[in-house]
Amino acid sequence: MVEGPGCKLKGEKLRSRVRGQKLQKSSGNAVEKGTKKSNKDGPDSHSPFDDLIGKHLTDIQTLGKELFIYFEEKCIRIHFLMAGYFVLNGQNIDEDHGRKQPQTTTLRLELSQDVVEFFKTGVEIRNSIDCQEKFERMKHLDICSMHFNQRAAIEAVMSQDGRQICDVLLDQDILPGVGNIIKNEALFDRLSGINPVSIVKELTQKHVSHLVQMTRDFSMLFYQCRKTGKPLQAHMKVYRKGTCQQCKGKVITTKTGENPRMTCYCPHCQDSQLKEERKLPSKNSLIGWVTTAATSGKSQLNNQSWTCQICTLINEPQRTTCNACLTPKVVPAAKSQPPDIDLPTMNTHIGGATKKAEPASGLKRKINSENTNTETKRLKSETISKHSVTMSDGSNMRPTRSVNEPNCSNNRPSRSANLPHGSNSQPIGSNIRPTRSVNVHNGSNDRPSRSANLPHGSNSQPIGSTNRPTGFAKFQLPLCKGHKKPCYMREVRKEGDTKKRVFFSCSMGRNKSCNYFQWADEKFPLCEGHNKRCVIRTVLKEGTNNGRKFFACQENKKKSCSYFKWADEYNDITIS
């Protein structure tokens, strides 16, 4: 599905090239269907698109997933559906789709200077006044618009108190432009994740406010990735991921909602039991999270980011204007600080005598702390000397811990008790074992595994473990020849003999791709009924087998031979 960010980018590209031109001719499937529909009762060949010939293209606007092309009093409304795109003068300047051009054209507009062709789209003709009124009425709710109003969006979401939050986000009459990718990533949050099936009335206003901010931020990140050609998948944390990118647990992939759509969520991070006291992030910025995360896997928010006072978008620190509405950055005035004074060198005269001034409270605490540490070291030295033991060779051995000390149950020496670094030796005459085991292979000091502290017979598992069967060899993705990096596994969606077949392709962005291609199903089994290559499918039903891959017949339900075989070696592979 082409979501709001992609539709906005298409509108910007078209507006800059074709606005002001005159329509000379129209053709395509939409024109032919319009002609047949209008000529049911008459022999004349007339189409509603013929009324637009000779009129000027006055403006192009986008609202969510809709594109409005105004021809004076009439308007062409374009919806890009799942994979719609356009071509200008035979050249593909719309790099958002990534699909090959089909043979049929939905709509072709021959203008005075340029020719625009739309593919895989829905086309309607409407009155310009109605489209303009709809745009003005809902532009403040458009998730990608520069007119976005966060307060209005929060009120619109909270008004749907009896619906599931996953349905509310996808409702284009509430938040135009939100698609399935944005829905999944916005609901997933590192501190206050919301379960997709949560009812709106179960959420507090703080949760809804934070969710709306996440939706807005990820939508603008989506837009920037599409505009610059960078891969969006690098910023995804849960959508089409087998493992949660935060807790490393299993991601549930299922279909939920009034009109079931694919939903990915982590049951550990997105708890269905929302709590009033759940802590929200101090910096409500999903962009700051996904772009400044540390290499260790811990998220670190950029404290230098700033929030636009007009559209509430949180921008990167180096930007001087808002990335959405171009509002200038407001720099707070710096607070003046008194000059530093060297207090120890200041002298005062009291009664004719010279006396040093008392240091500041912070300096006084530092001096007192140093005196206390010195006294503690002296007392500790006297205690150790008092309890030292004289050995037969005349040497003194200091005990690591007094046997008369309280809470001394194990009498184990500390790791640093007179032992050379990395050594497992013990003092002469000592029958006490060191805290580290001496039976370490190769003399290493490796720590025991995490499960070593589990009680005997415990079934506890670390976060991220699954009940999937083990013992099979995981499939290794091939490396592309151009970059020597693991490929992506993709599925053919174009109609034809190769539909639903999977193949390997370069994982780099469209601008950097080396065009590597290789069929990925050459080793797939053949179904018993048709002797055809099987396809890989994923279990979407919630349960112990959720997310498991299996081989199935490529035919539809009516013609399927019901072939089934588990494909567990592909469980960790994402098919896009």
Image (tube, helix red, strand yellow):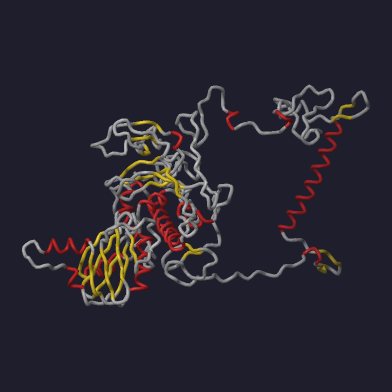
Seen in the picture, residue 299 relative to 107 is either above or below; the reply is above
**Horizontal placement of 415 versus 542: left or right?**
right
Total labels: the figure holds: 0
Instruction: Classify the position of the N terminus by image quarter.
Output: bottom left
Q: Position of residue 88 (x, y in %)?
A: 34, 68
102, 249: nearer the viewer: 102
The percent position of residue 405, horizontal first and vertical second, equals 75, 29
Image coordinates for residue 101, horizontal then vertical, percent = 34, 58
Q: For residue 310, which quarter of the picture?
A: bottom left
In the image, residue 121 sits, relative to residue 53, either above or below, namely above
* Picture quadrant where residue 560 is located: top left
Depth check: give the residue in front, 327 or 36: 36
Question: Which residue is farthest right?
Answer: 394
Percent across and percent down for residue 133 are 24, 69
Whether residue 198 is visible = no
Residue drawn at (48%, 53%) of the image: 235
Pick the residue in front: 82 or 525: 525
Query: In the rendered image, is residue 43 in sight?
Result: yes
Position of 554 with respect to 430 (left or right) is left
- In the picture shown, does residue 102 fall above or below 272? below
Instruction: Say whether residue 467 is left or right of residue 123.
Output: right
Q: Is residue 172 above or below residue 536?
A: below
